[in-house]
Amino acid sequence: MAGLIPNRHVSGEVLSAYLDGELQSGELDVVVDHLGGCQACIAEFHELKETRAWLRTLPELAVPDRVVRSVHYGPELSAFLDGELGLVEQREVTDHLAGCLYCREELQELDAARVAIRSLPRLEPPVLLEVAARRTGHTRRWRLVTVTAGVAAALIVALGVAASGPEQVADIDLDSFADRHVARASVEPGFAVIPAVGPTGATP
Amino acid sequence: MADDLVPSWEDVARLYGRKIYNFAYRLTGNPDDAADLVQEVLLRVRKGLAGYTPGSFEGWLWRITRNAFLDSVRKKKRRPESPLPDEDRWTMATSPSPDEVLASVRLSENVQAALLKLPMEFRESVVLCDVVGLSYEEIATAIDAPIGTVRSRIHRGRKLLREMLTWPV
């Protein structure tokens, strides 16, 4: 029993433990007996008690909200909703959600926001824009028709040349070729259709 | 918390988040460091709960807390000496009268300042005892020291603190 010597004062360490209710019965009896008749030890005991009271008057601080939020899942919840988490993370979030009311509520709010965003009506473009678009489409169609006509004419000439020659050009998929050509000509402004030249040198 | 139960992470965050924050704040005097420590501890708890076997949960938790704290101190390689921030005034759990608040704040500031001057081994034992409210046995588990050492450190810490508050330098 450290600090307990017969007829001596009780050590501060033992008094402190006594104050905290941390003495076992043997020590406790000795201290209680001693304190019954020793003013010096009683005075020290009261000093220790006062010091402990000072420490215990420290206000209990609330955890800042940002800490509470940050220790829960945040960005992961949106990714979780969108099925964008890896398997391990997904399992972690699922396990966490099972026991965390805070995150479940957060997930519900995120889901509600996502549903709200996704349920926004698809807007029709204003009339003026539609007219402008039609005009643009009209011009493009005309250009397409022009190019297509040029390609078709070139093909007709080419077929005529092939048919009149000694060899048949049977392996060429002309439809596919024409389609590709037309498609390219319609999307590449700088792509020029080279008109086919007939046997006589006249362009069709 | 009963020793045979494994708490959920949510329970730990809810029941101990504030205690961990107060422990860290009283040890560092710095709200940012305290906030960082709460995050770190709760993350470690989240990872560690899967492997936790029922036993002294308080001891397990506070050992994690202390280790996280010591790691953060080592990482920063500095002694926490920040002044008491205004936050102390605005986040008190209760709302006493203005006079009481002033007196309490003044005392709190002095006690906090004195705490920060204590050697770390005394400071952590005193804070675990008087701020967190752990028993000597729980503190012994948390700091991995015999109960006799805990008893000695708490007493010496309080004595030093009293000297600083009674005869301020």
Image: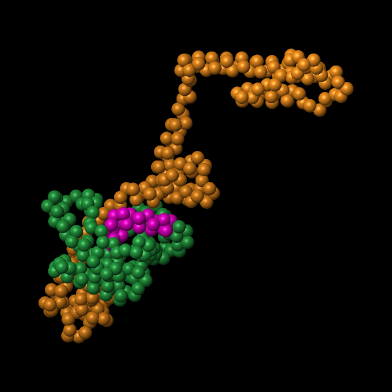
Chain colours: A orange, B green
Residue A123 drawn at (x, y percent): 47, 22
Quarter of the image where one finds residue B66: bottom left
**In this figure, what is the number of numbered marks?**
0
Residue A13 drawn at (x, y percent): 23, 75
Quarter of the image where one finds residue A179: top right
Image quarter in which the N terminus of chain A is found: bottom left
User: Who's the residue at 31% across and 54% down the image?
Assistant: B32
Residue A183 lies within the magenta run? no
Quarter of the image where one finds residue A36: bottom left
Residue A8 appears in the picture as rendered? yes
User: Who's the residue at 47% across and 61% down the image?
Assistant: B51
* Side (left or right) of A137 relative to B148: right
Q: Which residues are magenta?
A: B22-46
Farthest residue, direction right: A166
Residue B6 drawn at (x, y percent): 43, 59
Residue A3 drawn at (x, y percent): 23, 81
Comparing B101 with A183, the one in front is A183
Residue B92 appears in the picture as rendered? no
Q: Is residue A7 above or below residue A115?
A: below
Q: Is residue A163 above or below residue B71?
A: above
Report the magenta stretch's main SS: helix
User: Who's the residue at 23% across and 54% down the image?
Assistant: B85
* Side (left or right) of B45 relative to A13: right
Comparing B75 with A42, the one in front is B75
Q: Is residue A23 above or below residue B31?
A: below
Farthest residue, direction bottom: A6
Comparing A185 with A135, the one in front is A185
* Side (left or right) of B162 relative to A117: left
Image quarter in which the C terminus of chain A is found: top right
